[in-house]
Amino acid sequence: MNLLEIKDLKVHYPIKGGFFNTVKDHVKAVDGVSISIPEGTTYGLVGESGSGKTTTGKAVMGLNHVTSGEIFFDGQKLNSKGKKVDVRDDIQMIFQDPYSSLNPRKRVFDIVAEPIRNYHKKSRSDLVPEVLGLLQRVGLPPGSLYKYPHEFSGGQRQRIGVARAIALNPKLIIADEPVSALDVSVQAQVLNFMQDIQQDMNLTMMFIAHDLGVVRHMCRHIGIMYQGRLVEEGRTEEIFKNPQHIYTKRLIAAIPDTDVDEIENNLAFRQMVKEEYDRNFADHLDEEGRAFPLQSITETHKVALPVKG
Ligand SMILES: Nc1ncnc2c1ncn2[C@@H]1O[C@H](COP(=O)(O)OP(=O)(O)OP(=O)(O)O)[C@@H](O)[C@H]1O
């Protein structure tokens, strides 16, 4: 069963201008995106900066207006006009920057306990064992309880962010580029521990990243966003084996060698992608200069991957 279903989501922002500050045009931040995430799985939403990933995640969180489309969580429509469905404890977000997303004046105890306190009336003494349990779950020692965020490394701070996100035992986590602000050497550690938490808690996760290499081992399915649209979607390994859209190929070609072992002749692949991109990219754009959605990509846009041997 799909825990999250996004149907034809559009989020357009008006661009105002002129003497009367009238609406001149719209930024189509998200323009017709449909995504289904089965319960207990991780879906990777990938694309370059400005492609609409965060806007999609925030729309699910109810932090953005929705121009049109529908968002269903556990079968309930979230963005209906009438009575709002309260999913604050079921959907949590992990933010990109573990430095700015934690209040520097609060101790770890207060940061992690905050969502529980907002939701349940519990005394501090009742909360201590609960917060200690959460810290243990994310691999932080009990001595972390009364420390401040600046006393931790970037990777440890992201662990604090995860402890806060799982405090209410959510069903869905939207992780918005959780490792991109971290040193490459700690990214793998944080990814591994997030994967462990996801499996232990049977969480459903939307994992937002700009780097295909990051989502590869985390996500069963991925969607590639480009200028507000989903240009390619499918099982991760299928997409890595046989990417269809030139933009996806560019993202794969950008991954360091070690992550694309099965693409033999990687250098040749990169060169071919570059040449195809330079030669044909205009063919992938519609009249507004934006990428065609996947359905409208024809056979002629496909490039065969280099053949072994
Ligand atoms: N409140 C807003 N008003 C107007 N335009 C906005 C607003 N929020 C986002 N946008 C625009 O919508 C587009 C998509 O932004 P979004 O933050 O979703 O992209 P993203 O893929 O998450 O990028 P990044 O990886 O840099 O976070 C961008 O062109 C952005 O400038």
Image: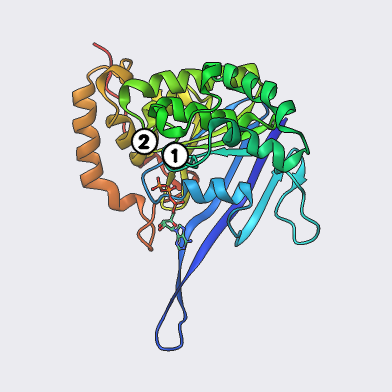
Q: Residue at x 56, y 49 (%)?
A: 58
Q: Nearer the viewer, residue 15 or 260?
A: 15
What secondary structure is marked by label 2?
Answer: loop
Give the left or right position of residue 282, taking residue 234 as reference.
left
Q: Position of residue 203 (x, y in %)?
A: 64, 26
Spatial CA span between label 1 and label 2: 6 Å
**Disc sitting over residue 96 in the figure:** 1
Query: Does ligand 1 reach within 8 Å of label 1's beta carbon?
Result: yes
Q: Residues within 10 Å of mark 1 (few under 14, many from 20)?
A: many
Q: Residue at x 37, y 47 (%)?
A: 49
Q: Nearer the viewer, residue 103 or 77?
A: 103
- Quickly name the residue at label 2: 181
Q: Earlier in the sequence, mark 1 or mark 2?
A: 1
Q: Position of residue 130 (x, y in %)?
A: 69, 23
Query: Does ligand 1 reach within 8 Å of label 2's beta carbon?
Result: no
What secondary structure is marked by label 1?
Answer: loop
Q: Is residue 260 above or below residue 165?
A: above
Which residue occupies the extreme bottom position in the image?
19
Could one spot residue 239 in this view of the protein?
no
